Image: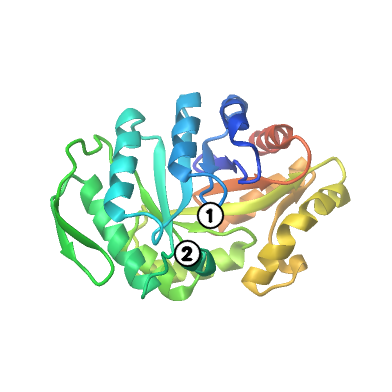
Amino acid sequence: MTSLRIGVMYDRAWAPEELPAFAREAERLGADELWVVEDLGWGGGMSASAVALAATSRMRVGLGIAPAPLRNSALLAMEAAFLARVYPGRFVAGIGHGVGDWMASVGAAPSSPLTLLQESTEAVRALLHGERVQTRGSEVRIDDLQLVHPPTEVPPVVLGVVRPRSLELAGRVADGTVIAEGQGPADLEAALALIRKGGATQEHELIVFAFAAVAADSEQAAAALRPAIEGQAAWLGRTPEELFTVSGTPAQAAARIAELEAAGATSVVLRFSGEDPAMQLGAVLAAVKG
């Protein structure tokens, strides 16, 4: 699995002050990426990204994901550019629709989520490439803005989306797509077909978030995962048993990662449940490399 990146998610429920130590340990264990979360009421994604980048020296750090309705496109580009200048080649900017009810609860619901995501992504990418942006879209308006300090190495802008039209949009306007937890190889193949229909090239990244738990006993791992997957199953319209997970013994987890890679994943980001996620990460990485 030399070309596949294996990463780990810093779960939104974990204490913010413990992020630096966890990031350092994940890097020491050999993880390629660390992804932070921006969900309403938890932590700010740009702040978490900055903390994780400052604590490490090699790993990529991904923001998964900034809700487009909650963040002004110009400000999002400014923040991403600053991090990319300080940590070139190590930051990935993730954008998505956001949870509709959450966006409405803070007065940020767009009239057209798909249009907003397209216009936001196009504006952010243009600004990060040093372009002078003048746009008066139906959702995004920027009047003659150019970044003073554009990144020397432009960070990838990836979209965290699920529905068919949004997946096509990701293929058309983004550098990559983030696939939500619970989706397996068949889902990846279907998503890739839509992404490519949108016009994605072979360089388009497919970053797969995956629920994960490993233990000496596979039943123990399954029990640790059960609370995490129930809500996601309802959101995806599936039963918990239908969700794809990276779980079981370390060898079984490594085999599940290989399935995702074979289906087109360029990164697999593990979202651990259960005790000592760093120990679990180390066990998975050792099994993959072994």
Q: How was this image coloured?
A: rainbow
The residue at 77%/56% (across/down) is 227
Question: x, y (%) of residue 117?
Answer: 36, 65
Q: Amino acid at mark 2?
A: Met
Which label sits on residue 40?
Answer: 1
Which label sits on residue 103?
Answer: 2
Question: x, y (%) of residue 187?
Answer: 57, 67
The residue at 74%/63% (across/down) is 230
Question: If the image is split into quadrants, where does the N terminus sit?
Answer: top right
Q: Confirm whether residue 56 shows in the render.
A: no
Question: 45 and 228: which one is in front?
Answer: 45
Dots 1 and 2: beta carbons under 8 Å? yes
Q: Please rate how many residues cluster around mark 2, counting C-alpha atoms within 10 Å: few if below 14, some from 14 to 19, many from 20.
A: some
Q: Amino acid at mark 1?
A: Leu
**Marks 1 and 2, how far apart at CA:** 8 Å
Q: Residue 119's image quarter?
A: bottom left
Question: If the image is split into quadrants, where does the C terminus sit?
Answer: top right
